[in-house]
Amino acid sequence: MGVFLKADGINKSFGGVQALKNVSFALEPGEVHALIGENGAGKSTLGKIIAGVLRPDSGQIVLDGHETSIQRPTDAQKLGISIIFQELDLFPNLTVAENIAIGNLKLEKSPFVSFRQLALHCRPFLDQVGLDCTADTVLKELSIGQMQLVAIARSLSMDARVIVMDEATSSLTEDAVGNLFDVIGQLKGKGVSIVYVSHKMDEIFRIADRITVLRDGSYIGTRPSREADADELIQMMVGRELSGKGRAEGHATTSRILEIADLSTDRLEEVSFTLHRGEVLGIAGLVGSGRSEIGAALFGLDKISGGTISLKNSPYSPSSPRDAVRKGIGLLPEDRKLMGLIAQMSVKQNMSLASLDGCSSGGWVEEAQESSKYLAAAKQTRLKTAGPDVEVTSLSGGNQQKVLVGRWLMVSPDVYFLDDPTRGVDVGAKEDIYAIIEELAAAGKGILFVSSELPELLRCCDRIMVMHNGRMTGIMDAMSATQEGIMSLAMAMEGAAE
Amino acid sequence: MKDRFLAVLKTYKGPLVLVGIFLVAVLISPRTTRGEIIFLGLGNLTDMLRAITPIAIMSLSMTFVILTAGIDLSVGSMLALSGVVTGTLLVEWDPGLLPSVQIGTAIISAIVACGLVGMLNGVLIATLGIQPFIVTLAAMIGVRGLALWFSNNERIGLGVGSDVAGSFGDMFSGKWLMIGTFLVLATVFAVVLRRTVFGRYVRAVGDNALASRYAGLPLRRVQIAVYTMSGLLAGIAGVLLCARTTTGDPNAGITSELDAIAVVVIGGTSLAGGKGSIIGTINGALIIGILTNILGLRNVDFNMQLMLKALIIIVAVALQRKKVSN
Amino acid sequence: MKDRFLAVLKTYKGPLVLVGIFLVAVLISPRTTRGEIIFLGLGNLTDMLRAITPIAIMSLSMTFVILTAGIDLSVGSMLALSGVVTGTLLVEWDPGLLPSVQIGTAIISAIVACGLVGMLNGVLIATLGIQPFIVTLAAMIGVRGLALWFSNNERIGLGVGSDVAGSFGDMFSGKWLMIGTFLVLATVFAVVLRRTVFGRYVRAVGDNALASRYAGLPLRRVQIAVYTMSGLLAGIAGVLLCARTTTGDPNAGITSELDAIAVVVIGGTSLAGGKGSIIGTINGALIIGILTNILGLRNVDFNMQLMLKALIIIVAVALQRKKVSN
Amino acid sequence: GGKGDTEAEKFLVVFSQCNNAEPYRATQNKRMNELFSKQPDVDLAIYDGQADAGKQISQIENAIRQKPHLLIVAPLQRDSLTKVMGEAVAAGIPTICLERDILEPNYTTFIRSDNFKIGRLAGQWIVDHLTKKHGEPKGNMVELHGSKGVEGAINRHGGCADVLKEHPNIKVVHSATANWFQPEAMDRMTEALNANPSGIDVVYAHNDPMAYGAYLSAKEKGREKEMVFVGVDGLTHEGVKYVHEGVLGVTFVYPLCVDKAVEIGTKMLRDPSFTPEKEYSIESSMILPENAAKILGEAAE
Ligand SMILES: Nc1ncnc2c1ncn2[C@@H]1O[C@H](COP(=O)(O)OP(=O)(O)OP(=O)(O)O)[C@@H](O)[C@H]1O
Ligand SMILES: Nc1ncnc2c1ncn2[C@@H]1O[C@H](COP(=O)(O)OP(=O)(O)OP(=O)(O)O)[C@@H](O)[C@H]1O
Ligand SMILES: [Mg+2]
Ligand SMILES: [Mg+2]
């Protein structure tokens, strides 16, 4: 088949950073073309240029053999190009339907709005992505995974010929991903092309026809996915061989560090489990199953309405996150932009934020102490940064995540609650994070590890508990667990619970 | 059942606070010698509505401005400019036109002048990227100077005669005309906000500016439009106030920007943008209106009034606020 | 070379604007009969500094408040309260103490009273989760009422005699005392912001409150602290103003909250929180100070002054702003 | 005396006005400009204190530095300006204190008007009016105050209350603060009317715009004949006009003091042998329908 959309010799720089260097990229009709690379390789930038959100410094977008002049997002939309943004840029106070319709030239032809028509219009797309909520739900009431489904529905509703999906599945669970892949299959049948950006190799092999690799803003190569193998792709991405280690060694002891009995909150019902020193306990479940809520309860964010917690063998009931930190709990939040980063602070200041009490005397920041602790944590996380004093937002996603991991390393709590720590993180950085988790376990910490990716749970955890609808539906040994077993527990009570 | 009742209570907190204040006003209202509750008299209720009208009108467009995460501090000065322009064109201009034509010209000139100021605010905010607070603060200072300069530092009296100026005063100070103008404008603004694409853009821009840009919304045009509207409504409020007081006063409306903002915020609109409604703003205007009226009827000492007002604003807002979310 | 020069220009935009305004002031300053540039006279420069001192002092803590993404509209009223308390304790209180002890008591009471008001603001904001704008707006209204009530609606004159009140006026209105107080406070605030844990927290809270909460920062304590500081500094400014005007005036400081906020924003601090500096605020205070001074020296018509001020504020801020990013 | 050494040299006269943005003050400024402009060798500079004592002090300090031949100060507050005016006198600058008192006689001469006296005049007029109306001094009064804590409001109230306290049957049934503003006065008066459905005899407002606003509110309810409106200030195009139109029953001129100041000031500039009195008191005059027309006619010339 012929080339349908072509990006030719694209250059783009932000201040001093050259994000794309003479990158070319071709898309055929009806193909799913994966775009992969490490954090900061330039994938999102290329996607945004295709979608008209950014303008290239030089280079051309050619569509159907015609040069285009895409100046703004609406130009791209008119040409049939739509995009799902990595950072899910949606409108929290608008309804689901309004989020889907906004900026859609076809739906906004008339200056007046009919809610009924809008709801009718949105319904099929919501059904397609499997989002079970009414069209007039206000967006901020959804969980992050559900929001991602809204973003997908929005781009489907654009009737586009090209859809750029920038890490569209980063917060989705297996069933939602399966759903999405069915939709992609149908779209392919209609000749729609998909640019599929992801860090999840298994997904890429499942869905992509061809795979293009970017590294440090440069084009490295394109492979048909049938002929590609993971090791080669990883080598193309990182420019060196990466020794993906196997299953982590167990470090679990029998000394209990955290015991939860019949814990209930507004969104949890009678959850009980025990965490030991040196243990990595995985938490699996579907979108909205209440995994994050366990962290919220532990960290003093949600009011506990029932049950008991004991931490290091003494009763524990946190009054605030500050109290939780004091008592030895650290929480790495699921949304790093919203709940993690202080955008206008430097890398070092972001890292030391939670442990300033330890780098100060009499309220004065001891800069030397802060710097040395920072250096240690940066080293442990293998942080790539231009320096300690650059703004944190100038880092790539994976490195931003490492900054937040480093923040808790500097605090060194007894229990870590890691909520999807590898979300949107590239393969190299993922390995780094797995390694850190193992080091922590070896040091006798207790770790709760929430993830939507079952393979990584199976790989890193000693045991895995499964959540459904705010309840714990099972807990199993990771050695003997299977993906199928976990999925059935995650969905088992569907219907029965209602 | 009880749950449903609680849910309804939660959704309609604003109106409930209003009803509460209304009931308190009824209870503490003085009575006539015949035992009638003065507060509840039709005359008093409409007086109350009219008194709050200029602020309430400005708070409608202020709601839009605040929804875009902006603010307009210049409305008080524009109100004064409008009154001064109206007054001057009615009193010191003798074009030999039909009175109705002259009155029309005066009104339109005043409103357009304020609209232009508002548009200038919008253009500076949208194109230079300066914070709305600072642009409209500068406009508040500068336009006050302009109004004083234009009127030669003097109040322009329209008189109560039957000449052009006097008949303007008669025509446009009617209770129902003022209240009616507000009701029409409120309906228009409510419909625009909820039922038009523009209204959706207004809410979107303040909710998430980056996402708006990504969605290809005409960010700048939306900003320019809301500040222009703010100017136009300040102009209308100024014309009405000029008619009601039969005076174009260059010192009118000092601190009324704060009153208008307070009405919007008491109505539940967030200064962070994105969240709010015209119904809420009407609610806020009524809360302030009733409060001022009943304190006046009871002839409460002015200083005590100030302290009570502070207290009631806090309580009214505290009662409406959502539970502090995590 | 040229690049470096441009880079330096970009980093120091604020001071450059200041230098520009300074140079213009020198150029357009009137001269004495002996040809000396009046603006540059030491007496005039220090007068200029002293004139801006009360606002400048309040703008220091206002910087902290705004860095936490808050705002404090009540500083003008607290300034008045402080003056009234000082005045009353000096004039109407006769405890038979040593004059210096009485003066000390008066000053400390005034500052503490304002600190308590500020703390109340902070507590309401931090615990009830009401928007700072509305809490401090209510405080602005209520505290004005309190000051008027406390002073029985009257200005309290300290007199210029050699009694306790008079000697307080003499002692605390000195030019160097006022300027010195400001310099000391400015240094303290700059150091606190840059070098302490608390300063770090202030910036973090304003940048991303949710993230600060997730990092276990004492969000509420930080908020309560900055509003308390705001009260304390308004109190200090009020004491100095009272000494300088030898009057405790319950109507002092009307609209000075806007002046203080303007100084902070002209100094480059963002009202969205998280970004800003004390150096910037000092810069902003000097820009406003010089501007007011030179317009006064040239005796520009007041209305023209207002319009020029508006223009210059816009230009000063526009010149400092970062290039609007795509 | 001035320092007009050479004939060619101009006289510099500085007028420190406490707040330009007020019609009464604007009228003062205008009148002062008008009168001094008849003397081509006088340069008049008007400084605006913007209702801020600190600012006015700084401006006078500036003025002292320029060594004017005559300094006229309309002080914002009695206490605040005392010291700096003392400095002016000490620097040898002939200084006129205009209209408002300061603590010490730190001036060459004081040209005063007296709000307390005006309040008393108004009170007496009200007593006379009510006596005429009811045969004895009794009746109901509404009082609309200027801004709380401001000298004018305090003394215009105080003077009136001083007279009324002798007449316990004259009751103040409603007393509200309208901050000198007409729109606020209209709203406050509306509330007063609603709270008192009948029987208001007098409305005493601390300035004419408030009195006028009160009239408009009463007229709208058809009750303007029920009561009489008393104002203060008597600016030609406001108070005098209102009285002439029958809107106000009476208003009391708050003297501009400017004519006298220019007369005395001119002598001080030009006649080295002239020594002004320490104080000139300018009496208020009463504007009644009988004399309003004449004053309007004079002003129109
Ligand atoms: N708005 C911006 N301002 C400055 N630098 C930017 C901006 N956007 C991207 N960059 C930089 O450009 C480079 C490419 O970023 P991009 O977001 O395209 O990477 P990515 O491949 O999508 O990474 P990730 O896998 O983390 O999403 C990075 O170095 C990034 O820091
Ligand atoms: N702030 C909130 N207000 C109301 N409901 C919420 C809120 N946050 C989450 N929920 C709801 O609570 C339930 C549990 O959400 P939670 O985020 O814990 O799920 P999760 O298992 O962590 O899934 P995810 O993959 O989305 O993180 C969901 O039904 C979600 O919609
Ligand atoms: Mg990306
Ligand atoms: Mg979650």
Image (tube, coloured by chain):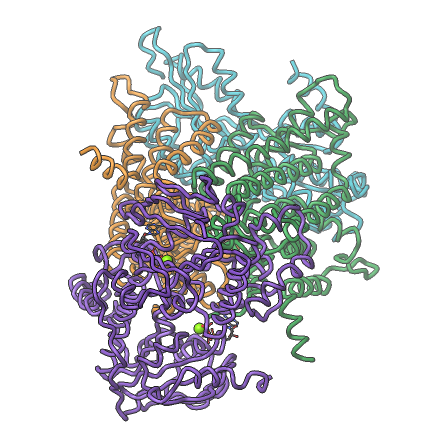
Chain colours: A purple, B green, C orange, D cyan
Residue B77 image point, x, y percent? 55, 37
The residue sitting at the bottom extreme is A254
Nearest the eye: B198 or A63? A63
Res. C64 in view: no
Question: Compared with residue B239, is residue B95 higher up or lower down, i.e. above or below?
Answer: above
Query: For the image shown, how many numbered marks are present on the structure?
Result: 0
Res. A368 in view: yes
Residue drawn at 34 percent across, 51 percent down: C275
Residue A20 image point, x, y percent? 31, 48
Residue drawn at 28 percent across, 28 percent down: C23
Question: Compared with residue D208, is residue B30 higher up or lower down, i.e. above or below?
Answer: below
Residue A148 image point, x, y percent? 48, 64
Residue drawn at 66 percent across, 54 percent down: B282
Question: Compared with residue B208, is residue D115 higher up or lower down, i.e. above or below?
Answer: above
- For ligand 3, the image quadrant comes to bottom left
Nearest the eye: A252 or A416? A252
Residue D294 image point, x, y percent? 70, 19
